[in-house]
Amino acid sequence: MNGNLHSVELDFERTAALENAQQDSMFRLDYRFELQRREFFKLLGGGLLVGVCVSSLAQESGRKGRPSEDNLPTSLSAWLHVAEDGKVTVYTGKVEVGQNIRTSLSQQVAEELRSPIESIQLVMGDTALCPFDMGTFGSRTTPNMGPRLRNVAATAREQLITIAAERWRVSRDTLVASDGKILDPRSRKSISYGELSRGQELVTVIPDDPPLEAPKDWKVAGTAAPKVDGRTFVTGEHKYTPDTTRPGMLVGKVVRPSAFKASLVSLDSAEASKIPGVAVVRDGNFVGVVAPDEPSAVRAVRAIHAEWKAPAQSSDATLFSDLRKRTSEPGETYGMNPSHVVGSVEQGLANADKTLSQTYTVAYIAHAPLEPRAALAEWNNGKLTVWTGTQRPFAVRDDLAETFHVSPENVRVIVPDTGSAYGGKHVGDAAVEAARLARAAGKPVRVVWTREEEFTWAYFRPAGVIDVKSGVRKDGTVVAWQFDNYNSGPSAISTPYNIPNQKIEFHASDSPLRQGSYRGLAATANHFARETHMDELAHIVRMDPLEFRLKNLNDPRLAAVFQAAAEKFGWGREKGTPTRGFGIAGGVEKGGYIATCAEVEIDPARRDVAVRRIVAAFECGAIVNPDGLRNQVAGAAAQGLGGGLFEAIGFDDGKITNPHFADYRVPRFTDVPKIEVVLLDRKDLPPAGAGETPIVGTAPAVGNAIFAATRIRLRSMPLVPRGLPKSS
Amino acid sequence: MSLALLVNGIEHKVDPAPDQSLLSVLRDNLNLTGTKYGCGEGQCGACTVLLNSRPVRSCRTLASFAAGKPITTIEGLEQNGRLHPVQEAFLKLEAFECGYCTSGMIMSAVALLKQNHSPTDSQVREFMNGNVCRCCTYPRILEAVRLASTRASAGSGEQAR
């Protein structure tokens, strides 16, 4: 252990707290209600109920409550119900957005409960049924919710054993739980979980830290279980929010302002109101329509003449200088300013053989989830129910409660498994819009954003400017490292390399565009800058980029993924040419270790770059579902090509200049090369999340490969939005 | 405007607005919500259906244009409880993450395999380049199309309806 490692961990905690502050910037009303045990069983029927309390994890704490016989504690984070018919229902506030946790969590419950995976159903993201949860982000489902569900399942299993032992008047030690039954091997008697639950109204609440079965002994978890509801996705049967309907439902649309920050000067809706069944709703700057069907709603929006007034706003042409100028004072960064100092950078630079100072930039990019933001809202006697695809159902519930001056008990948010999010669905804009229109119409209203609305009125991954100043010795030892990130964020800002003198700082800026979370957050930007700069240093000291990294690394887990990726890729086996280059990059974030190798082919005549091959090696502790994990790692690596090569949001004077797939290029079949995934299964380590981190290696690996072929060093993401430039 | 739409072998009388898209009629009038809205601009392929056995973007196709022509949607592929080989291949290889693009992907792949029983990888890429998967599950989708084509050419070819 060296001194650095300790500081890095502290930094991680601090940046995690900062991220949470960013995610949870909305004020949450502190209404909590104690759920009566009787009410619960009235809702679910009799049986066995096991709940798990949240530990002291700040990021997911509800108000602490003391468990008692009749009142369930308010700090419950999940519960499991074994019904009298043997069906197992697990309630968790986490949501499924394509990261496959409905399956991986079911596997973990099946593992500990020793019940077939088919007998288990997860109710997810329903604020009326599920305990409070901060949200599905930060790759926290696997490390946090996974163990909690394993705990409730293990506790339920033990309880079922106890009930069986009492019934048969035998010692519980002689009984075995298996396949949804308790068996007595001596008398060969068996009894199903359903039978044991019959007539029970048993509640148990446990803390979330009892010991669990070791991953090496897993039988269901740790295997490539197929997606539990996979069939409904290939038949079109699964209902996403835009597919959900209610009796009497109307179609809602919002009349969007002419620009960001615009206010409404005048509104002429006479023509629109003449369309049969159409009503126009105006409330301050909000203008919307409801109509019996989609075509009438579209016609109504077109028929409205609204005059807006907006202040002059900046454009992408001055973005990077603006981000530096607008830097906030330290202390304004959500109350925190993660700067990290080890040794003396000045001294380190003075003692270096070579120094290097470079600036890296990243553009704003859009999540562009294929399922656009959507919501269906219904009011009933002052109570509001909203179906919407969000990563934070409870925050959206509280937002709705605050917006409509009702208490959160009267708001229910239900999240159907959602058509992706990538960090883009943290807020409930569509939910608020649908609820506002539904209240005016007195009928359920569904709002589905158009693609142009998606590209304009959602939020973006932050743009950023990163300055790196470093010093290196001739033998390849990095001795000084100064890293300043403006605006893009503090995730993975710490260097995993062992550098004696470091100064690392995040500077918040006033973003010209609405910005927020994105898969991996700023880890992508920070890895791009760091891993490109490391490559530049390797080149300066004439060392192989892999060898150079390993020389400066003493984290064995990171070294292991670098070596695994290099081996699979055949790193160093072939020499690059001016039209063919190889690059490598890697790092650690959110408990996951990634190394990515890329091969690019250059077409010098057309100034074209094609990525031909990617190898991604990933390690996130014990693997819960290797097949699901492979899908996540390959998908993230490929999605990283978009932001890496060509995705960038253009903006000018309060407008987005490329709000369509026709001019905002996303990765397509012809962009995506062969992707090979190497998984390192560390059964001796607890599982970490995997949905985000594998994205971070792609852009720097590709950029480094382009350099290896062309000697052109690209320091802006996207790297080649208009083809390969003639020089750096 | 009264029309007869022939969807998955069943004739439906509908009364769409003159400017109403086939996508909107399928989803809103016929409650066939397996076909998805992704962009409304013909750029993402989520709304792909077969019209006269050819893939079309139903968001950019007027309902009136489709009148009288055979239309196949994702709901029409399964026959007597048996998945279409392309659906089977997608399910077997789990060629999806969030699943929102899947209907359109499957419809495009079905259309391709009707025209070409054993396409090369680059033919698949070119043919399906108008279908976006934002989760970027492209490598698995390619594999699934390959698997379905192998199965089709290995004897159950007639299933490629």
Image (cartoon, coloured by chain):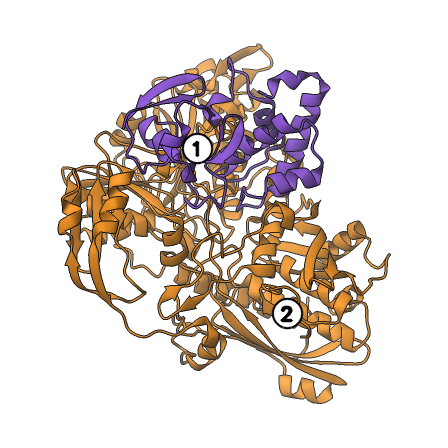
The residue that mark 1 highlights is: B35
- The residue nearer to you, when weighing A693 against A351, is A693
**Residue located at (39% from left, 67% from top):** A513
| Circles 1, 2 touching at the beta carbon (< 8 Å) | no
Graded by Cα atoms within 10 Å as few (under 14), some (14 to 19) or many (20 or more), the crowding at tag 2 reads: many
Give the amino acid type for the residue marked by disc 2 in the picture.
Arg
- In the visual, does A601 lie left or right of A77? right
Graded by Cα atoms within 10 Å as few (under 14), some (14 to 19) or many (20 or more), the crowding at tag 1 reads: many
Asked if residue A444 is positioned above or below residue A30 in the image, the reply reads: above
Colour of chain A in the rendered structure image: orange
Colour of chain B in the rendered structure image: purple
Q: CA distance from mark 1 to mark 2?
A: 43 Å
Task: For mark 2, name the chain.
Answer: A
Give the amino acid type for the residue marked by disc 1 in the picture.
Thr
Residue B96: mark:
none
**Residue located at (41% from left, 79% from top):** A326
Residue B149: horizontal and vertical position, in percent? 67, 27
Instruction: Name the element at disc 2.
Output: helix
